[in-house]
């Protein structure tokens, strides 16, 4: 059976992001989302969740967007805003200028905030996939276990080997994440956590339009696949997050693609079962 989890990241980042994700679920193929509890739109997103009981909601661990819940530290600037890129975090961990204990404290507080929703996360993943860094993956596993989440994202794009040209920035990032995933699935299983058999959408990145989604659906393998996406309505609030590296208009393109009749029809014709994490 071909089973597909379509996960929209960044719920709670802004009201426009949340509105786009909810629409992509109600009128499209999105089945799951990841809540960014550090986002300025968290409270509004929490209120909207009651209207979408069928939408799976996971915890989107964060070290790169918004303000830390644990206050100013080596992870932030003087105002408590996260100030590192994923590469900067990796370098800080390697140089020991960032203590993993700070990450454990921060992610623990993010879990506590998620739990105010009164629900168990369906899975755990992270902004910019930083939970896949070797020093941080064990902490992500701890958080998932504490949360009672049944699943964790293993970010290894299954198209890395089949799409080696051109060597784009997104391909290089996906290849690095796939390398970091070596052994991660085994470690997750040892903690009783599941993960999708394959992951898509990392290489596509900002180019996840209707044609790309149709192409990915046509190549879908047997088993469970996660498609990572970022639908949203954009505006000044979202554009203020320069660290997100998505061209203006891209998230709206994804929203339109995920709700397009051709995409819905393709899922039906292929006999693809839309699902959530941990189901």
Image (cartoon, helix red, strand yellow):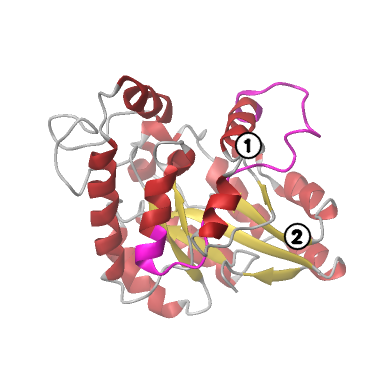
Q: Position of residue 157 (x, y in %)?
A: 67, 42
Mark closer to the observer (2, 1): 1
Quadrant hosting residue 141: bottom left
Q: Quick check: 103 above or below 142?
A: above
Q: Mark 1 points at which residue?
A: 178
Of residue 89 and residue 171, the one placed in the foreground of this image is 89
Q: Do the residues labelled 2 and 1 touch (CB within 8 Å)?
A: no
> Would you say residue 147 sits in the magenta stretch?
yes
Q: Quick check: 208 above or below 16?
A: above
Q: Residue 5 carries which label?
A: none
Of residue 175 and residue 191, the one placed in the foreground of this image is 191
> Tag 2, which secondary structure?
helix
**Residue sitting at x 53%, y 55%:** 188
Does residue 44 appear anywhere in the picture? yes
Specify whether 207 is left or right of 61. right
Quadrant hosting residue 265: bottom right
Q: Give the range drawn in magenta.
A: 144-171
* Total number of numbered discs in the rendering: 2
**Residue sitting at x 79%, y 52%:** 214
Question: Magenta segment, principal secondary structure?
Answer: loop
Q: Where is residue 261 in the image (x, y as percent from the top left)?
A: 75, 64
Of residue 242 and residue 120, the one placed in the foreground of this image is 120
Specify whether 6 is left or right of 118. right
């Amino acid at each position: 059976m071909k089973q597909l989890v379509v996960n929209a990241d960044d719920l709670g980042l802004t009201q426009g992001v949340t509105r786009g994700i909810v629409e992509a679920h109600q009128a499209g193929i999105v089945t799951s989302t990841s809540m960014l509890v550090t986002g300025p739109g968290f409270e509004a997103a929490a209120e909207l969740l009651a209207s979408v009981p069928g939408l799976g909601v996971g915890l989107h661990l964060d070290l790169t967007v918004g303000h830390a819940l644990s206050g100013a530290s080596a992870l932030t600037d003087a105002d408590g805003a996260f100030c590192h890129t994923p590469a900067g975090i990796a370098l800080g961990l390697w140089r020991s200028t960032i203590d993993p204990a700070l990450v454990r404290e921060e992610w623990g507080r993010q879990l506590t905030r998620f739990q105010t929703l009164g629900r168990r996360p369906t899975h755990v993943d992270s902004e910019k996939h930083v939970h896949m860094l070797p020093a941080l993956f064990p902490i992500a596993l701890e958080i998932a276990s504490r949360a009672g989440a049944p699943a964790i994202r293993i970010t290894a794009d299954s198209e890395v080997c089949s799409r080696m040209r051109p060597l784009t920035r997104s391909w290089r990032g996906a290849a690095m994440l796939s390398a970091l995933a070596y052994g991660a699935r085994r470690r997750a299983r040892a903690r009783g956590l599941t993960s999708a058999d394959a992951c898509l959408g990392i290489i596509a990145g900002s180019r996840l339009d209707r044609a790309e989604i149709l192409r990915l659906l046509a190549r879908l393998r047997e088993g469970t696949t996660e498609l990572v996406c970022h639908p949203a309505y954009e505006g000044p609030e979202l554009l203020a997050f320069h660290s997100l590296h998505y061209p203006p208009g891209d998230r709206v393109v994804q929203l339109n693609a995920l709700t397009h009749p051709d995409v819905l029809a393709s899922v039906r014709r292929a006999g693809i079962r839309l699902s959530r994490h941990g189901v």
